[in-house]
Image (tube, rainbow, N blue to C red):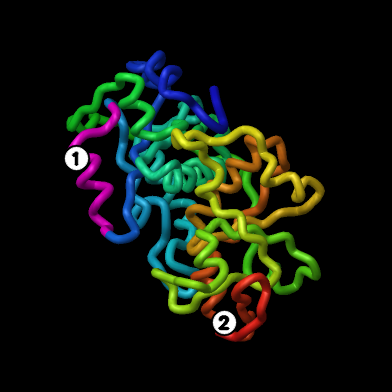
Amino acid sequence: MSGTLIDARTLAMHAGDPRWICFDCRHSLADAEYGSAAYAGGHIPGARFADLDRDLAAPPGVRGRHPLPDRDQLVARFRAWGATTDSQLIAYDDAGGMFACRFWWLARWLGHAAVAVLDGGLAAWLEYGGALTSKVPEVQATNFAPRTPLTRTVDADAIVRSRDPTLIDARASERYAGEEEPIDPVAGHIPGALSLPCSENLDERGRFRRDGDRFAALAEADVVSYCGSGVTATHNILAMLLAGHEEPALYPGSWSEWLQEPSRGVEVGNGTASAP
């Protein structure tokens, strides 16, 4: 059983094993129906579809654009998907793992250790010669039981109270610097945060890097990962684990929640303070 990454070859070797369950996490922030349409058009055989907005997040509001889902409701979804405590869960997408990592983190939030991201995503599966199907699997509901979370979270108040939080921002550097903001109403970053775009976790083939050099300065730090809404922040969490670091905490509300309270302030560029 794996708790980080699985390659396409290993996944293919377990084709037909009912304990191995794939989850198609394809999504587009620009088109809410993209993922379901892509799944209907062809997915890894046996895969369930996990919708970011409907399954992996609560409705948007003061807690951000993609708040954590209600834990009991998420457990109910895992039961409906046919997951058990013995299942090896594999999440994939077509965006470098940016959405699959959210599923990976949420499964660990429910205490399920045997969950991994398909390294290279759907492209790696196709490159290996894996087949696709449009058939939706018949699933028998289970009594999946959550366990103690394997993850950590912090909220905005804890960040404000902390004298020296080590925050890493997973968004593109242009959004961090306040040069552009295509989604949220204010550009910039949380004061004191470091820019570590999650796109740099991948090599030229879309696989996760293993060297970990970009995280070397964080070796002794208690790190909190955030992004725009708590989704791609989980990509940096997985990358740091792969690099041999302690698992960072997630700030689930991230930038989209931080902006809800103007007194928290923002920074632009490399640390110029301003107010939202």
Q: How many marks?
A: 2
Residue at 66%, 34% (x, y): give it. Answer: 211
Residue at 65%, 53% (x, y): give it. Answer: 249
Q: Secondary structure at mark 1?
A: helix
Quadrant location of the N terminus in the rendered image: top right
**Image position, residue 231 (x, y; %):** 48, 54
Q: Amino acid at mark 1?
A: Ala
- 99 sits left or right of 260 in the view: left
**Pointers 1 and 2 in contact (C-beta within 8 Å):** no
Q: Secondary structure at mark 2?
A: loop
Residue at 18%, 32% (x, y): give it. Answer: 134
Q: How many neighbours does mark 2 have within 10 angstroms: few (below 14), some (14-19), or many (20 or more)?
A: few
- 273 sits left or right of 90 in the view: right
**Image position, residue 251 (x, y; %):** 60, 60
The magenta region covers 31-44
Q: Observer-nearest residue: 112 or 273?
A: 273
- 175 sits left or right of 35 in the view: right
Q: Which residue is mark 2?
A: 261
- 77 sits left or right of 151 in the view: left
Mark linked to residue 40: 1
Q: Is residue 40 magenta?
A: yes
